[in-house]
Image: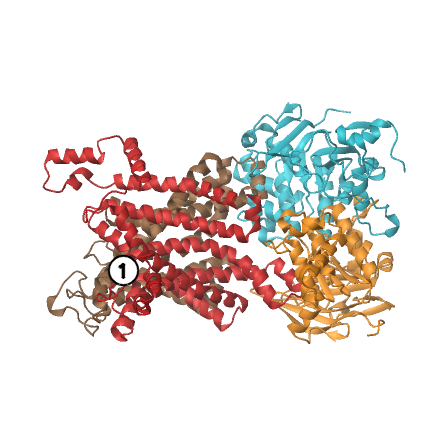
Amino acid sequence: MGVPLLEVHEVSRLFPVRGTRRWLHAVDGVSLSVMPGECVGLVGESGCGKSTLVRLIARLLDPTGGRIVFDGRDIGTVPAWRFARAAERAWIQMVFQDPVDSLNPRFTAFDTIADPLRRLGVAPERPRLRDRVWEAADLVGLSRELLGRFPHQLSGGQQQRVAIARAIAVRPRLLLLDEPTSALDVSVQVVILHLLADLQQKLGMTYLFVSHDLNLVRLLSNRVLVMYCGRIVEAGPAEAVFNRPDHPYTRALLSAVPVVDPGERRPRIRLAGEPRSPVEPPATVCRFYGRCPEGFERCEREMPALRPIDRDHQVACHLFESRPGTTLGE
Amino acid sequence: MLRMIGRRLAIATPGIIGVIVVTFLLNRALPGDPAAYFAGPAATRQAIEEIRVKLGLDRSLPEQFALFVRDLARGELGTSLTSGQPVLAELLARLPASLELTLCALLFAVAVALPLGILAAARPGSWIDHLTRVIVTAGNSLPIFFTGLLLVYVFYYLLGLAPPPLGRLDPFASAPRTVTGAYLIDSLLMGDPALFWASARQMILPTLTLGVAVLAPIARMTRAAMLGVLSSDFMRTARASGLSPATLLYVYALRNALLPVLTSLGGVFSFLLGVNVVVEKIFAWPGIGSYALEAVLASDYAPVQGYVLMMASLYVLLNLLIDVLYGVIDPRIRIET
Amino acid sequence: MRQLLRHGRYVLTENRLTLGAFALLLVFVGLALVGPWIAPYDPLATAAAHKLEPPSRAHWFGTDHVGRDILSRVIVATRLDLAIALSAVALSFVLGSVAGACAGFFGGWTERVVSRLVDTIMAFPLFVLAMGIIAAVGTSVVNIIYATAIINFPFYARLARAEVNVRREAGFVEAARLSGNSSARILAAHLFPNCLPPMTVQASLNMGWAILNSAGLSFIGLGVRPPTPEWGIMVADGSAFMVSGEWWIAFFPGLALMLAVFCFNLLGDAVRDLIDPRRRT
Amino acid sequence: MSETAPLLTVEDLSVEFRTRDGIVRAVDRVSFDVRWGETVGVVGESGSGKSVTALAIMGLLHPAGRVTDGRVIFRGVDLLAGGEGQRRRYRGRELSMIFQSPRTALNPIRPVGKQIEDVVRRHADLAGTRARDRALGLLAEVQIPDPGRSYQAYPFELSGGVCQRVMIAMAVACVPALLIADEPATGLDVTTQAAILDLLKQFAQERRMATLLISHDLAVIGERSDRIVVMHAGHVVEMARTAELFRAPRHPYTARLIASTPRPGATLGDLKPIPGGVPDLRGNLPPCRYRARCDRAIPACDEPPLPRVELTPGHTVACRVPL
């Protein structure tokens, strides 16, 4: 075990709720670490705070509390608006969900890819800049003739290649992937996934891959974090989490994933009701309590902490504290 | 509901404060020495100084503003130089004439533009759609003083159908006893249909002039709003449910389309209050617009100030009314506040 | 760019009305440029012997109550009317878009100051405010421009604020931040260019309104001073003669005014079609 | 009405859209049928014409679209031949449809209960409190907690999942024979998605309601359908029973589509992309619209018409060189 590239300690982020004095707990005391060269998957349903969490790590948002340590330096203290000039800016880059939204409609592909190179001072002078843009385009398999085009003149797959080229042009060490394929058709999705896997090999990048689609996360990730209502409820090696999920939420989530072959279907675990509101949730109640098919009275009294149940495998559930070392009756 | 009105009032407050400050500053921005100006050309230096003290012009600007607000709170808007009468009394006496005209014009415009916009949107490409387009484009391009004059030329000079453009009643008729100040209503209250007809005849051309000018924006907004609603997802759902055409049009489409139309009525009303001046000038209408215009041309500033304040307060009130109506129709506003 | 040109040609050729408006615009611009040289008479020269003459061969548009040639006055007035509207729109466009864009992007006190200003202006019926301003600061061409610009300011400020606001959270803005752009640079180089198209549409739709407003001020006697040829005053001059049948004095300047506004409105619609084909109504 | 005849037969349906940049042939000679009580899945990438087909069946095409050819026979009646009035009588009563993005698909300023009630009043001849009771009953049937309160709620107060349940309640209010569900669960969370699809399945079974389920997600379609129609660029390329389609896809596109869909147990290396993109549907198109993406094409593929071969009973493929 080496030194983690990224360590997040008890990070939280609150947002004021418009028209009230209340706070929305988007991310609530999350800790995680990412080793160099890993691909960590982050799964959770919409509104669980995973987008906020990656934006905190990308330093687009300031955390309300906690520390974000990148390569040994606490970067969470540098305000987001000033982070553009931080040394780590080029090292942490991101690919967004919707390429239409994340590409400036008035920038050509060339200008889009060149923007970080110019701004982050990697290749300011003209001929060198062109070389670097071409190099990035080649890496993502974007033909050079397309570089003069505007986003609306490109297909969805090509747009996402431009977005990836922009992110890797400055050779980041950590690449945050925020649902990079969910706006794409399935045929293009595979191409982009292959491309991302190749790039990680070639450039030795570390990935944090965020998705609501468990089938995708398992394709790319070594390790998986499951998020629910602002907190991480399960973390562990991808194989373990997908094949032997422990947290009741993970189990329900996995059982809901549609599978083509009816023979492979696990018995469906139905969840009752709606997720708990993230607006000032009680600090002493498990966030999943009320929907959880296994919930008992302790879940209403005490918020379970993320505890190891196995080597590298952690779960935030009282079921495992009361019966350490065992898994749910299968 | 009351909470919502309260909230809206709170939102309108900075605007009202702004109006008072701007009106005050406009008065202080008068070129030259106001005291000398008010005293008249023949005044001695001492007389000018006396007037300066009397008007409070020797004090600092914040003090002057405090005095101004105090007077305002007491309903004192100063006196007119030319008539020597209190401005507020004169404005109030003339307000009904302007309001009657403005509201009639608004009513006329809405009555014509709303059905036009709805029909145009319901049948895109039909003759009524094309007609609406022509009306909208032409109506937006018509200088209101030009249409007014053309109407006078055609209906008074050429055809002789309309009475001469000389105020609310011809000089030989006597005005109805003042109850509301609106001749149309007062004459009916008196039970005098002849008088009602006489004042209605005088109203027709100025109402048309104003109404035609605001027809276009209302029709345009109605049509655009209806088109937007008709192509929306929820209308598709409603049609997929096989609802009757009447339910679709009135319960589903129209109510949603009214929201943006209602918002645009605020702008329309603002426009009407402004161009009142022009129309009152053409038709010698004895409203507050012509009063203010005379005052401006005579460099009599107190009435102008009073007029601007009164117009702004009317407009703020109307916007409040629109907001309340909006809340009645739209639950998203009602519930979230 | 080529696509835009092709689209432009489409808009012009598919809609004859737009083509007509475009031609009319060229005529007005031509008159504004060379008007004083092609006017048949001196627009200020009075001729007591020829007063109140109806349109004839010598005076196509007739003469007014002091015998001035109306055609010449209408032609010469073009430059002044267009110049006032153009300067006012340009002024409010620049100030409004900068103020609005900053308000929408930075929020906080910048936004509070700008929205107070906008709210205050919008709390007045706009024509009334313009009257009040002119009455206070005096009638001159420059003051008309200022007054018209002030009452136009809220539209640009609001639009710019809204346009920046909807894009502030867009992915490409976040991406620009990741690329190392400072806030000021994001606003100037990434956001503002994207807000320009709707602002341009607003400006072209606004031109007609600005012309109407300044002419309206002149009509009620709060604008350009007689005897300067200006369409609004000329209509005002002729208004007294409408009831006695001398229609041409007010009619021709009014018609010129109407055509100019009409032309700008049609072109505004065309610009909107050109820039945003989806919002075609 | 004999129940051996299909409930719905779509025959050679073609739809065109007029746009500024030319005519888009969005749907071209599409044929398939739906039998009583069965669930037919329609799958295809964006631009494959699946939603347009559904809207054409309902008679709800955008004004720029036009059915140029074909028949839509529902319970023996050609819906395209009849007028709008006739279609209106079928819609919501015997033929219902639910849509993607349920929150915008409901009237934003009308309580959701009222919206259900509108449908009940229109088709079920109920009035007054009986219509209201029926609406409340439907809210309970689609498993919305506290129907009394939800009745008064507006769409913006409800989550996407609950809004979709409301839309299902509207659609099944009059026990339709066929429900068209256009991406009913897309954009919803995985757990909500499964719950919505379960609900649809439950109604289909309880009421012998046939379902035409449309989705871009092959996994959803595979899990929920009895038969599958695969569409590509406005053509039906393959049609078969679900198990057979997955076991032995015969059209190269279907095979590629299956190979590119992530499934549990598959590694990234197992997934194969589909070369090329969906062709531009304007202008002149080859008879087979998959031609440019296909690695099995032979010269005969350039000759019209597009073949339609029934390989085994119920398994048809539009290909000259099927796998």
Closer to the camera in the image, C167 or A113: C167
Chain identifier for the cyan-coloured part of the image: A
Label 1, residues with CA under 10 Å away: few <14, some 14-19, many ≥20: many
Which residue is farthest right? Answer: A330
Residue at horizontal 33 percent and vertical 48 percent from the top: B310
Q: Quarter-wise, where is residue A94 in the image?
A: top right
Give the answer, above or below, for where A6 lies relative to B117. above
Chain identifier for the red-coloured part of the image: B
Question: Which residue does the numbered mark 1 point to in the structure image?
Answer: B285
Specify whether residue C6 is in view.
Answer: no
At which x and y percent is residue C68? 17, 64
Chain identifier for the orange-coloured part of the image: D
Q: Amino acid at mark 1?
A: Trp
Q: Quarter-wise, where is residue B28 in the image?
A: top left
Closer to the camera in the image, D120 or B128: D120
Chain hosting mark 1:
B
Specify whether residue A46 is in view.
Answer: yes
What color does chain C have in the rendering?
brown
Secondary structure, mark 1, is loop
At which x and y percent is residue D322? 82, 64
At which x and y percent is residue D222? 81, 55
At which x and y percent is residue B144? 32, 61
Give the answer, above or below, for where C31 lies relative to A223. below
Closer to the camera in the image, D178 or D269: D178
Give the answer, above or below, for where D117 lies relative to A316. below
Q: Is residue D170 left or right of residue C118?
A: right
Q: Is residue C117 left or right of residue D106?
A: left
Coloring scheme used: by chain
